[in-house]
Image (cartoon, grey):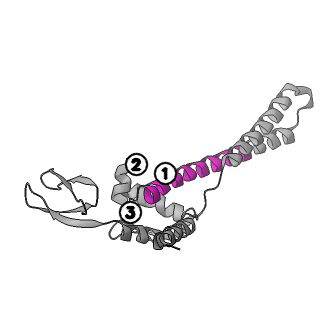
């Protein structure tokens, strides 16, 4: 087996172990709607049958409706978590962004919110074997570290102002100080 094939297989295995799970939560949401509608129909039938007025049936219908709404809320919250997971998964693993500032800029949220959401996803088991390092605002873990090792970075001096800038191979970035375009082409 070639060295590159082993490296790719290792990366896929690490990525599988890092990604945790992505549950499908639409069932919970729709189940809650069905429960709510059942309670609503019970309530409606009881109001139509005034001659059989029973407090117990009204209370039971109300309780069923509340349970349905609670299930809808739980399903909605889980759907939001799943959406956040898919978004952050793509950003971290596909776009290879490993700082919370980069991620926050990419999704258009504050850094504090991104950290809180990723930590919640880690806590709930969506992400495995990664963590947020709040001291330097980075995402760390085995797969993240292996990707970081593969990215070639170099400090180059800006031809315009002379400032040192970190540049990733085959990418064009702007100088942090004067805005001049900088690129690192490995030969």
The residue under the point 56% across, 53% down is 81
Of labels 2 and 3, earlier in sequence is: 3
Of labels 1 and 2, earlier in sequence is: 1
Q: Which residue is mark 2?
A: 107
Where does residue 8 sit, x and y in percent of width and height? 49, 67
Q: Which residue of the protein is positioned furthest toward the front in this rendering?
A: 1
Q: Is residue 151 visible?
A: yes
The residue under the point 37% across, 50% down is 106
Question: Circle 3: is it few (<14), some (14-19), or many (20+) Cα within 10 Å?
Answer: many
Where does residue 71 sit, x and y in percent of width and height? 69, 48
Question: Circle 2: is it few (<14), some (14-19), or many (20+) Cα within 10 Å?
Answer: few
Q: Quadrant of the C terminus?
A: bottom left
The kind of secondary structure the magenta stretch mainly shows is helix
As drawn, is 79 to the left or to the right of 110? right
Q: Which residue is mark 1?
A: 87
**Is the Cβ of the residue at disc 1 closer than 8 Å to that at disc 2?**
yes
Of labels 1 and 3, earlier in sequence is: 1
Q: Which residue is mark 3?
A: 98
Pick the residue in front: 164 or 99: 164
Question: For the residues marked 2 and 3, what is the alpha-carbon distance in whole angstroms?
Answer: 14 Å
Q: Looking at the rendering, which quadrant does residue 54 occupy? A: top right
Where disc 1 sits, the SS reads helix
Q: Is residue 22 above or below residue 64?
A: below
As drawn, is 107 to the left or to the right of 14? left
As drawn, is 137 to the left or to the right of 161? right
The residue under the point 43% across, 71% down is 146
Which stretch is magenta? 66-94
């Amino acid at each position: 087996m070639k060295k590159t094939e082993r490296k790719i297989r290792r990366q896929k295995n690490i990525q599988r172990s890092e990604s945790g799970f992505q549950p499908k939560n639409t069932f919970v949401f729709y189940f809650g709607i069905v429960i709510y509608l059942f309670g609503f129909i019970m309530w409606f039938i009881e109001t139509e049958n005034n001659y059989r007025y029973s407090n117990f049936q009204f209370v039971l219908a109300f309780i069923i409706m509340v349970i349905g709404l609670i299930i809808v809320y739980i399903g909605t919250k889980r759907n939001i978590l799943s959406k956040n997971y898919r978004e952050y998964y793509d950003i971290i693993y596909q776009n290879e962004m490993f700082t919370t500032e980069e991620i926050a800029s990419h999704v258009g949220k504050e850094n504090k919110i991104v950290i809180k959401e990723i930590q919640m996803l880690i806590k709930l088991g969506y992400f495995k074997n990664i963590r947020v390092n709040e001291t330097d605002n980075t995402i760390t873990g085995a797969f993240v570290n292996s990707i970081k090792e593969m990215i070639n970075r170099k400090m180059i001096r800006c031809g315009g102002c002379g400032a040192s800038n970190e540049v990733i191979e085959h990418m064009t970035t702007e100088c942090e100080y004067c805005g001049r375009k900088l690129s690192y082409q490995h030969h």
